[in-house]
Each structure stands twice: as structure tokens, then as C-alpha cells.
Amino acid sequence: MTVRLRGIQVESLSKSWGNTQAVKDVTFSVESGQFLVLLGPSGCGKSTTLRMIAGLEPVSGGSIHIGGNDVTHAPPARRGLSMVFQSYALFPHLNVAENILFGLKVRKVGRAERDERLKRVADMTGLSELLARKPAQLSGGQRQRVALARAIIAEHPVCLMDEPLSNLDAKLRHEMRVEIRALQQRLGMTVIYVTHDQVEAMSMADKVVLMRHGRIEQQGSPEEMYARPDTVFTATFLGTPPMNLIELADGAGGAVIKGMTDASVVAAGQGDGRLLGVRPEHVVLLDEGGLTARAESADYHGADTVVTALLGSQRINLRVPGRFALEQGAELRLGWRAEDVHFFDFESGRRCEQDALPRVA
Amino acid sequence: MTSSRLNQVYGWLLLLPAAVLLVAFTHYPTIRTLVDSTFSKSTATRPARFVGLDNYAMLLDDPVFWQVAVNNLIFALGTIPASIGLALVMALWVNGKLAGRGFLRLAYFTPTILPMVAVANIWLFFYTPGIGLIDQVLGLFGLPGRNWLGDSATVLPSLIVMTVWKEAGFFMIFYLAALQAIPPELKEAAMLEGAGRFTYLRRVLLPLLMPTTLFVLVNAVLNSFKLVDHLFILTKGGPNNASSLLLYYIYENAFSFFDTPYAATLTAVLLAVLALLAAGQFLILDKRVHYR
């Protein structure tokens, strides 16, 4: 199956209903064949952005280009894209084959070609045995496949997906994630995928656009965003458990952890109004030295245990491999490498550059 | 007594009130009607006697019965498709995004709330020759008025128009409810696939509305035989039986001519026709209806 190559450019896109602005000045681009994830908490404007790209929602400002053509005000059918809806939007009165072929019939594709494409797509999505069934007779995962098959049979170069996996159970979600990614790469489709699940974003995306309150918070590859979050929001939205954020204070000789009595300096320079960020997997237990913390609770996950400890009066999570025998109130010595530490301004939530002092020798 | 037997007794006791009402007012009258239709009319001098199917033979020879039957057929064909079609169009219209939607819905539903007798009085004012609304409007354009209800050529169409006006709003409510249960993503998915309004209507909306259509159709058919209240106000079946319908003819026979056996015979025929129609609708259409 060959698909024409096409990228998408979204320029200062905005959407408002009356006085509420749902999307504000959103700019990003997807290269042809790329998998872009629009990520964010519910109500952040990611679905609205997707619907504007699909043409289902009129645009209030800005422009959308697909394959170099301005489609800002074009009707949905003229944009050369297909879409997978969160609810799947299958036609309940049509069987699986008729659902998949709906678009081809509307566009008057010949019978022979229709049958051939149906066979290919049904094989690809594992639906060959189910073609005569009605959607009501299918499981959630199978319905999801039908929606997917309907999107790829069109052979449109661009596919939009609006939280397609949110109605599936955890195991199926994982399988479909792998499958969707594999299909996308095999067909060379350009995909814009909306989700609130950072795991989906991290595991599938070539590029992540993180949104918050209708604006783009940060965009980049999953690795970049995880390793170098620009804001507190990005830092805490990506990763489970989220990055630890510890309030700092001015101390003698540098920044110290706020509220700690045996305060030892953790960074050079200013401490007041700053947050120190460190991911749970970067916090290590030391035999001696480091910061003294009190063990509070342990959350066993199988491969590892997330231990919560009190650093002065502030909570910190750390990831310890295997099972961790917790003695409540026990004294722990914590440390981290200087390069794993991030600093943020408390007021603005923005990243700031500061030198961390190594806590691990 | 074992507990399952006791449960059976409870079950029957619970059914009893409804069963008594049904038997007393539906089943017994039906059977009594069928029995009555095989007896002759009783007079002061001669009591009723069993005549077998004589009443039915008389019915076949009764020209008024045939005229009334044809009237009813025309009335049904005139009101059923028109009211269902109009109901669907109105429902699609008030289901869309438009200003004053609530008011429009209410306006379309109003005729349904009115009793048929009140409706008939309103339309009597419309149809009155010379001073009626229709004739006055026609007069504005210099067109001659006519006696809408007094002319055997226009009386039945006049009644059909009025009935459609009354019924469409009621059926609209069912269509509107069904339309609101259809998720909007279906329309969006269809639009993305390049389907226009008409294709969406034909390929998605109408099939999904089929259960409603069947329900409305059964009601419309029943109503076309059941609704005769307006005849009492407007025409009394005239002129020259041109607007008489089956049920009205039954009423006349029973309570004006006091020919109970013949009225029973007509009733039996009407029941048979309705049963046949209902069975036909379900058998033929059920296969084509998708129930969610």
C-alpha cells in the first residue's frame, strides 16, 4: 500500500466560544510519516485542536496546512484525512465490512477494487473472520480494530486519532499501542494522536506536543521532554511517579532544602523561590553521607518499589529495584547525580539554570 | 403447599387486577362482538336468533359499507405517509442548531395536546364557506371560495389535511427522541468519509430511525381507523357518506340505527383488517429494522 507523503503545519491556531478561549496560539508541525502526540490533561484544548485540523470545528484564528495546501476553511472530506474517534463512531446498523467500506462506497470506488482493499485491510487488522458481524456483537478491542480499518482503507496520508484507546482495558491498550505504531510505520502514515495518557505519548510518539490551558507548554521528542522539561508542569506530567519537586531556601554557602535542620547545601547560588526537581529513579540510597530522610511508605510494583520518604517536611519518592523491606520511620540516606537535577523558578514554574552540587561521590 | 406452588399463587394474584380489567373490557367484549355478529337484530316482536354468516353476506352487498371502506383507505393513504414524512422533516429541522428551537418544538407539538374535538372546531372555522379563514385568504387574491366540507369532492381531502396537521407533531416527538439518541460522531465520521447530507440521511439516519418509523407507522395505521371524533363536529359523515369512515359507520349502525348485530359485524371486519395490517407490518418490516 503506498501513501502519498504529506506533512501538516499548524500556525497560531486559536478557538474561542464567546468569551472562553479553548485554544490559544497553537503552532506546531508534523513531518510526513511522523507520529505526533497531542498530550495534556482533560480540558487543555487538545481534542479541539484535533477537531479543527479535521475540519469538524470552525477555526477562530490561525491556519492549517496539509501537504502544503491551506485547508483552514476546507470541508472535512477535502482535507485528505481519516479519523479514529474515541467512541469509534461505528455505524451500528452496518456490519463490519460495510462499516469499513462506507467511505469507499460514498466515493464510488469500483466493486473489484473495494473488495481487494477490504481483504487487505481486514487481514492487516485481523478482522477477516468478523466481517459479517454487527458492531454490537464485537468486543471493545475488535470495535477499535474496525475503526482503525475504516481509517486505513481510505489510504489517506494523514490519520487523526482522538483518544482511541481510552475505552480499552490495560492489557488490550498495550497491545493496540504496539499495533497502531507498527501499522503507522508500515504504511508511512502521518498521525496526530490525542491522549491524556503520558505512557501512550512516551511509547508511541516521534514528537510530543504538551498542552495546558489551551496553550502549548512544550514540544519535542519524548526523550527531550523527559530529560529536559522546560516547566514544572512538563516535569510532573511526564513520568510515573512524577518528578520530585523540592522547595529550596537560602543557606550558608548556597541553596539548601527548605525546612531541613541539618541543612546541607544542594546547589550553588540562590535557594529562596527555587524548586529542585529530581526523578524518582535518579534518587539513590547511600550507605553514608547524602541527605537524611525518614522512610514513610513503600508502594510495591513488582519490578521495583516506590518508596516515599520525608526530607525534612517535604515528601520525596524514590524508585528502588525489587522489593523494599520498609521500616517506618527508618533513617534513609539519599543522594543523586548533579546532572540528573533540574531547577525551576517557584513563581513562574519555568526552568532555570543553576549548578547542582553532587550528592553522590 | 411447596414454596414453588406458593410462588405461583402469588404470581397469579399479582396478575389478577390487570387480568380482570383486560378480560372485562377487552377480551369479553371482543368475543361478545363476534358472537353478536352471528345473530339477527332483535325487535319488540321477534327475539334475536342465530343466523350464521348472514350478516357478513349482507355486509358484502351493502354499498355504503364499500363506500366507507374506500373512504377509509383513501383517508389512511392520505394521512399516514404525509404525517410520517412531515414528522420526520420537522424533527430533522428542530433537531438542528437554530434560534428559537424550543419554541418551534412546542409549536409543532401543540396540535397533539389539543383534543380532536377542539381541533375540529378550529378547522371548522378555517373551512367555513365564505367567512372561514381559507375563503377569506383566497378572497384576498380574488379567488372564489368554496364549501370545503359540503362538497363531496373536497370533504375527504379537507379532513386528511386536518388530521395530518394534528398527527405530525405527535410523531415528530418520537423522531426527535430517536434523533437525539444518535451520537453526533456518526455524522462527523460520515462527513469525513465524504458523505453529504443526503447520503448521511439515506445511509445512516433513516436506517437508524427504522425502529421509530415502524412504531410510528403502527400508530398511524391504528389512528387512521380509530380517529373519528372530528366527524361528529365537522361532517357527520356527509355529504352523502363522502366523509364517513368505518368506525363512524359502526357508531351510526349501533347508536343511530340501533342495529347492534350489523355494527358487531362491521367491528369484526375492522378488527380483522387491523390485525392483518399489524401482522403484515411486523413481519415485513421487522427484518429490515435494526434494533440497537
Image (cartoon, coloured by chain):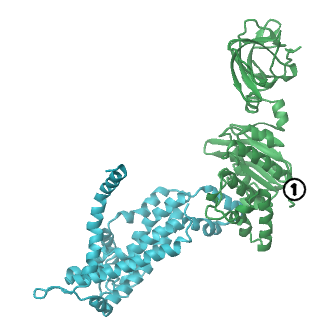
Q: Of the residues shown, which amino acid type is indicated by label 1? A: Leu
Residue B135: quarter of image: bottom left
Residue B111: quarter of image: bottom left
Asked whether residue B129 is in view, the answer is: no
Nearer to the camera, A215 or A164: A164
| The colour assigned to chain B within the rendered structure | cyan
- Residue most toward the right? A361
Q: Tell me if residue A246 comes above or below residue A64 in the rendering.
A: above
Q: Is residue B131 left or right of residue A80?
A: left
The spot of residue A265 in percent (x, y) is 81, 10
Q: Residue at x 83, y 9 (%)?
A: A289
Crowding near the residue tagged with mark 1, few <14, some 14–19, many ≥20 C-alpha atoms within 10 Å: some
Q: Is residue B22 left or right of residue A240?
A: left
- Residue most toward the front? B1
- Residue most toward the bottom? B61
Asked whether residue A67 is in view, the answer is: yes
Q: Residue at x 42, y 65 (%)?
A: B170
| The colour assigned to chain A within the rendered structure | green
The spot of residue B34 in percent (x, y) is 28, 79
Q: Is residue B218 left or right of residue B188?
A: left
Nearer to the camera, A175 or B210: A175
Residue of label 1: A5
The spot of residue A197 in percent (x, y) is 72, 39
Q: Residue at x 53, y 57 (%)?
A: B180
Which quarter of the rendered picture does the C terminus of chain A lie within?
Answer: top right
Residue A28: quarter of image: top right
Which quarter of the rendered picture does the N terminus of chain A lie within?
Answer: bottom right
